[in-house]
Amino acid sequence: MTHADDVTWMERAIELSRKCPPAEGAFSVGAIIVGADGEELAHGYSRETDAHVHAEESALAKLPADDPHLADATLYSTLEPCSERKSRPLTCTQLILRSPIRRVVIAWREPSLLVADCIGVETLQADGIEVVELAELASQARSMNAHLLP
């Protein structure tokens, strides 16, 4: 994927995050999984199917774990995948690590507002996953979370 492709897909993920039902104490996040051929494989957003589902979790749940397209896919998430969570047994970082996905693109890092020290990026990188941060889109990704941010 080129940088321009990454920006286009992240902009689409940002649009998905606008669909999130509003919640106090939870970020609105969009996620898209894109195959190496540039075709969307799945997408999800926070609280899409229940009050606790995260965007990455929702997108990953729509595909079989052994989908052969996942090995060359990129997961786009408007926020750093969570590394700590109370509502589910697995974090989004753990779900990604259990999948064949080897590339993740984010718009912004999770602030210490809800989780003191999110280490999703570092954990993914330690496992050899390429993580790209599109800082130029961070303000757009944060915009629907303004009610949570100081």
Image (cartoon, rainbow, N blue to C red):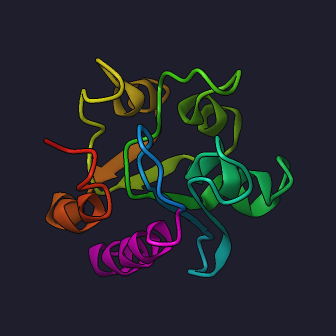
At horizontal 79% and vertical 60% (from top left) the residue drawn is 62
Place residue 87 in its image quadrant. top right
Quadrant of the image for the N terminus? bottom left
Quadrant of the image for the C terminus? top left
Q: Is residue 73 above or below residue 150?
A: below
| Residue 108 horizontal/vertical position (percent) | 26, 50
Q: Is residue 102 above or below residue 13?
A: above
At horizontal 57% and vertical 36% (from top left) the residue drawn is 92
Residue range of the region highlighted in magenta in the rendering: 1-20
| Residue 71 horizontal/vertical position (percent) | 67, 53
User: Could you tell whether 101 is left or right of 3 in the image?
Assistant: right
At horizontal 47% and vertical 58% (from top left) the residue drawn is 22
Q: Is residue 14 above or below residue 123?
A: below
| Residue 79 horizontal/vertical position (percent) | 37, 49
User: Could you tell whether 130 is left or right of 75 in the image?
Assistant: left
Is residue 1 visible in this depiction of the protein? no
| Residue 36 horizontal/vertical position (percent) | 59, 71
**Magenta stretch: dominant secondary structure:** helix
